Image (cartoon, rainbow, N blue to C red):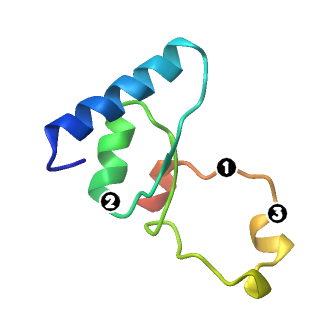
Amino acid sequence: MANDQHASKIVRALIGMASSMGLSVIAEGVETATQSRLLQQMGCELGQGFLFGHAEDLGQLTLGRYGDGERRSLSSAAA
């Protein structure tokens, strides 16, 4: 997305459409701080991906770590 204007325009359009319908957008596959920053500038507040943490084996998941129902904002990745 950072180096592809077409991809960036598609992402911006999708975020705009969702926003105009009162929907939240969760960006999937956020891998870099640059992607996170661009998404925030486009109005996307939530994201998931390797920037926030790698996938874990099902046996390693614990309710305490992932079952709290909390959403993590893109800005928390910069902290």
From the viewer's side, name the closer residue of 5 and 31: 5
Element marked by disc 1: loop
Category of crowding for the residue at label 2, using alpha-carbon neighbours closer than 10 angstroms: few (below 14), some (14–19), many (at least 20):
some
Q: Which mark is residue 71?
A: 1
Instruction: Tell which circle, 2 or 1, labels the residue nearer the N-terminal end.
Output: 2
Where residue 65 appears, x then y in whole percent? 76, 72
The reply to whether dot 1 and dot 3 touch (C-beta < 8 Å) is no
Q: Which residue is mark 2?
A: 33
Q: Which mark is residue 67?
A: 3
In the displayed structure, 26 sits above or below 21; it is: below
In the displayed structure, 41 sits above or below 64; it is: above
Mark 3: amino acid: Gly
From the viewer's side, name the closer residue of 42 and 29: 29
The reply to whether dot 2 and dot 3 touch (C-beta < 8 Å) is no
Mark 1: amino acid: Arg
Where residue 69 appears, x then y in whole percent? 79, 53
Which image quadrant for residue 62? bottom right
